[in-house]
Every structure is written in structure tokens, then in C-alpha cells.
Image (tube, rainbow, N blue to C red):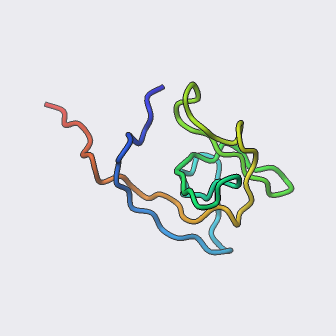
Amino acid sequence: MAPRLPSGALVVARSIDPRTALRVGDVVVARRPDRPELEIIKRIASIDDAGAIFLAGDNPAVSTDSRQFGAVTRAHILARVRWRYWPLPPTRL
């Protein structure tokens, strides 16, 4: 599958607070648990009953995601992506 956000894409993301509902399928900005200085954009693949959040990339053949660094906690989630504004989507004629 082609990535939904190409490298270098610019997005608008809204910070989350403890009341923000997170759902499977949301695209979020998170800190990698093994490299906390690195912010990543991934899709929420699942949320288990204990609160562990599994993140997945849209291109599993090359994405680094929870399969490599494990589940994240809600504290790792910084924001939810609202929309991409660059590059512009292709136009249909």
C-alpha cells in the first residue's frame, strides 16, 4: 500500500488532552518509546483494555512501528492529525 503521507508532507495536528478520545484508525503524532527525541506519525492499529496503543505505518513492508518498538502509552501520543495541506492532493480532470 502506498503511504498516505509522503515523506516531507506538511500536516495540521491538534494537541490532545486526557479527555480526547482516541480511536482505532486515528492518525497521530507520537514519541517513539525507544527514541523519545523522535516524533513519528502513525495510525492507531489497536488499543487494548490495559491502555496499550499499537501504532502501524501505512506501508508495513518498510514502516517502523509497534512491531519493532512495541506498544506505546497514551503519554507518548502528542497530537491527532487533522489534515494534510502539502503536497496538495492530485486533481481530477
The image shows residue 26 at horizontal and vertical percentages of: 57, 51
Q: Is residue 7 found left or right of 85 in the rendered image?
A: right
Name the residue: 57% across, 46% down. Answer: 43
Name the residue: 55% across, 29% down. Answer: 62
Q: Quadrant of residue 51?
A: bottom right
The image shows residue 93 at horizontal and vertical percentages of: 13, 30
Name the residue: 43% across, 38% down. Answer: 4
- Extreme left residue here? 93
The image shows residue 41 at horizontal and vertical percentages of: 52, 50
- For residue 36, above or below residue 47: below
Q: Nearer the viewer, residue 84 or 70?
A: 70
- For residue 84, above or below residue 76: above
Q: Nearer the viewer, residue 72 or 32?
A: 32
Q: Quadrant of residue 69?
A: top right
- For residue 55, above or below residue 13: above
Name the residue: 52% across, 70% down. Answer: 15
